[in-house]
Image: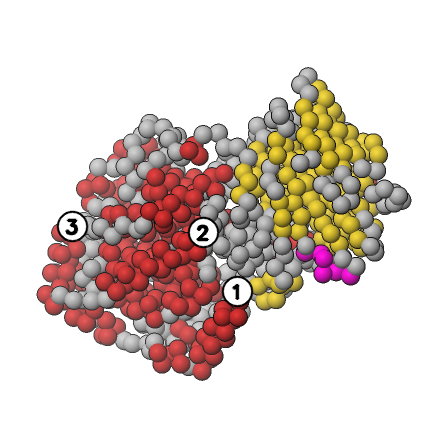
Amino acid sequence: MGIGWCAYRGVYELARRSGWLRLRSPARPWEAFSLDRVLSDPSLAEPESLLDRRRQGSRFLFDSARLTGAKGRFEAWDAGEETPQSIQLAESVLAGRIRFFEHSVHALGFPPDWHRDPYTGARVSAEAHWSQVPLLGASDIKAVWEANRFGWAYALARAYARTHDDRYAEAFWVALEDWCDRNPPGLGPHYACGQEVSLRVMAWAFALHAFMDSPATTADRVARMLQALGASGQRIEANIGYALSQRNNHGLSEGAGLFTLGAVFPEFRAARRWLTRGHRVIERLSRELIDEDGAFSQHSANYHRVALQVLSWTVALGDRAGHPLSDVARERLGRLASLLRAIQDETSGRVPCFGQNDGALVLPLSNCGYEDFRPALAGAWHVATGGRLYEDGPWDEECWWLGGATEPGAGCDGPTARAVGDTSALVSGYFAIRSNEGMAFTRCGRFRHRPAQADVLHVDIWWRGTNVACDAGTYSYNQPPPWDGGLGGTSYHNAVTVDGCDQMERAERFLWLPWVRGSCSGVRRSPCGLLACLEGSHDGYSRLHPAVSYRRAVILLPGEGWLVLDRMRSAGPHSYRLHWLCPDLPHECEPREAKLCLTTPSGPYAVQMGVLPVDGAAKAEFRCSLVRADPESPRGWRSRYYLDREPALSFDLTVEAHSIILWSLLSPGLWPVAPTSSRSLAIEGPGGVARVSAGAEDGPLVARVEWVGTVEDSLEAS
C-alpha cells in the first residue's frame, strides 16, 4: 500500500468528516437533471423524441431482433424445468419477495422498501448526504444495498424475453419510478458507494433494452431513467478517485459504469468524457489488478468472478458500441477465465470458496446456481477469444446475453477446454493438483495486494463433486463479535495455528499486518503420474518468541488419497493446532484415534490425523476434538452465501512440542497408516502401499514418496 496510499486515505477521511466532500459534490434536486440540462441535443429534451432516438438503433449487447429469434435457445436452456427459474424469480419479485445474495428470499413488498434491512428490520435514513451516511452501524449496509442494485431486474428481463408478458416490464418501470421518488440525487445510502451506483447503471441499461418493445416502456419513463442515469454518472465521476485507491473491484466497476453511460447513451453531454474516463480506468486496472497468470488482486474466488463479469460486460459492450478495448484488456480477461477454469471442480462447476465472499453475482443470467462458475467463465472466454469452454448447457445463456454467437453443438475449442491438469501459478501463488476424481487446491506466494484472509496454505480437497475439506467462507463484514469477519482467521481454515495466533494480525476490518510471505516451487509429478506433490512455506509464525518455521506438503496418492504433512520447528515449546473443516454430513468420529468418517453422496470419506516427533523427541500426546455449530463461536460453521451460515464439522488436533511433524490423510474410506520411523509413514491404499519419508530439518519436507503395487512409481525431492 505504501505511504502515498496511507496519505491519500487520511486526506480523504478528513475531507469526508469536514464536509468538504459534501460541498464538492452537493445533493441536487431532480430538476437539476432535466433532459435539457443533461442531454447535448435540445430536440431530445422532448420525451417522445428521446424514445424514438433510443429505438432507432441499438448500441447495446442485444436488440429486439435478437430477443425475438431466441425462443428455441431459451427452451433448450429451460429443458427439464416445469417452470423456468427466471419466471419463478420474476413472479417472486412481483409478489414483493426479493432474493438476497443469490440465496435467501425476503419480503420487501413491491415496490420494495428501499431503505430497510430485511435481516434486522432496521432502516437507514435517506436524508443525509451520501458522504455522511454511516456504513458501519447496527445493520450490515450490504443488506440495505442489495435490492437497490436492481439485480432482480435481470430475472424480470429474462422472464419477459421468454414470455413477452408485459407484467414484468411494467414491474420494472414501476420500481424505477418509485426508486427515483424515494432517492433524491446525492442523498441517502444508495449514493454512498460508487460501485453500487455503477452496478445499478448496468442493470438499468440491461432492462431498458430488454423491455424496449413493451408498451410499458413509455417516453416519460425512459426520460425518467435518463435523468437517473445522468445523476448516477455525476456521482460516479465525482468520487472515482476513492474507488481507484482501493485497488480492487470497486475501481473496475466504477470504470465500467462510466464506460456504459458513455458508450450506450451518447446523447448525454458528458458522454464523451465518461466514455474516455471509463475506458482509461478499465485499461489501467486490467493491467494493474490482474496478474500475468490470471489472478485478481483481491485473493477471492467471488471477487475474481466480479472482475470477470464486469470486464466481460465492458469488453463485449465496447465491441458492440464501436469503442473496443485493447488487446491487452481482452487478453487479461482470458487469463482471468483461464485461472478460474484451472481450479474449477469438473463435476459441479464450483470453485474453492477462498477469500472474502460478499454474495455478489453481477450478471445473474442463467439457470445455474450461485456457486456454479460455468456461466461466468463461458461468457468471459467467448468474449475474450470467441471460443467455448464447455459443451452445451444452461451456462451458455450468459454468453448469449453478452452477444455470443456460438451455435448449439459447436463443441469446445479453447485451450482450457481440454482435460484440466495440475496448476502452478507461480506469480500469484495459486496451486492445484488434479486427481482422476477431484483435486487439492492451495495458495502460497508473495502478496502484491493486501491479503483478504489469514489463509496461506489452507488446503481445499474435492472428491466426486463434494468439497470434502472446505473453506468456512465469510458470512458478514459487519456483525457483532464474533461474526464480524471472524471466519477469515487462520483457526477456521484447513491450516495449522500456533499458540492460537493468526498468520497475521488483524489491523482493521479489511487489513491484515504484517503481510505473510509464502514460497512454493510448484507441483511435481512422478514418472508414471501416479504420485504428485507440492511443498510450500510461510513466515507467519516467525514473529513469535521463540520463532516457528513452518512448511507444508500436499501429496497425491493412488486411489484418491491425499497426505498432508506439516513440519513445525522451534527452539522452544508451542501449542500447534491442526484443523480441518468438512461439510455437515452424516459421520462417525473416534477422537482418541483422531479419525473422522463421513458419509458423502458418493460414498464414505475419511479424515485421519497424527503426529511424527522429530529425531530425538519423545512421543507427543495430542488432543483431538470435533465441533459442529458451536453456539458460542464461529467454530463448526461455514458460510457459502453472504449473511447465511450452516453447520459444518470442525475437526482438530492439538499438540504441545518444540518441533514436530503433523500428518493428515484424507481418503475414500479409512486407509491403514503406520509410522515406520520418526520421519516416515507407510500407508496402505487400494492396490498397493505408499511409503513417505520426510527430509532433514533444513531441507525439503518430503524426501521421497514410493508406491509399490501393480505399477510401481516414486517421487524424489527436487
Distance of mark 2 from mark 3, alpha carbons? Answer: 35 Å
Q: What secondary structure is found at the residue carrying circle 3?
A: loop
Identify the residue under disc 2: 290
Q: Amino acid type of disc 1?
A: Met
Residue 249 image offset from top left, x and y in percent:
43, 57
Drawn side of residue 630 relative to residue 657, left or right: left
Count of number-bearing discs: 3
Of the numbered discs 2 and 3, the one sitting upstream in the chain is: 3
- Residue lying at 63% horizontally and 51% vertically, measured from the top left: 518
Q: Main secondary structure of the magenta part?
A: loop
Residue bearing the label numbered 1 = 1
Mark 1 nearby-residue class (10 Å; few <14, some 14–19, many ≥20): few
Q: Are marks 3 and 1 in contact (CB under 8 Å)?
A: no
Residue 140 part of the magenta segment: no
In whole angstroms, how far apart are the C-alphas of marks 2 and 1? Answer: 16 Å
Q: Earlier in the sequence, mark 3 or mark 1?
A: 1
The span shown in magenta is 540-545
- What residue does disc 3 label? 57
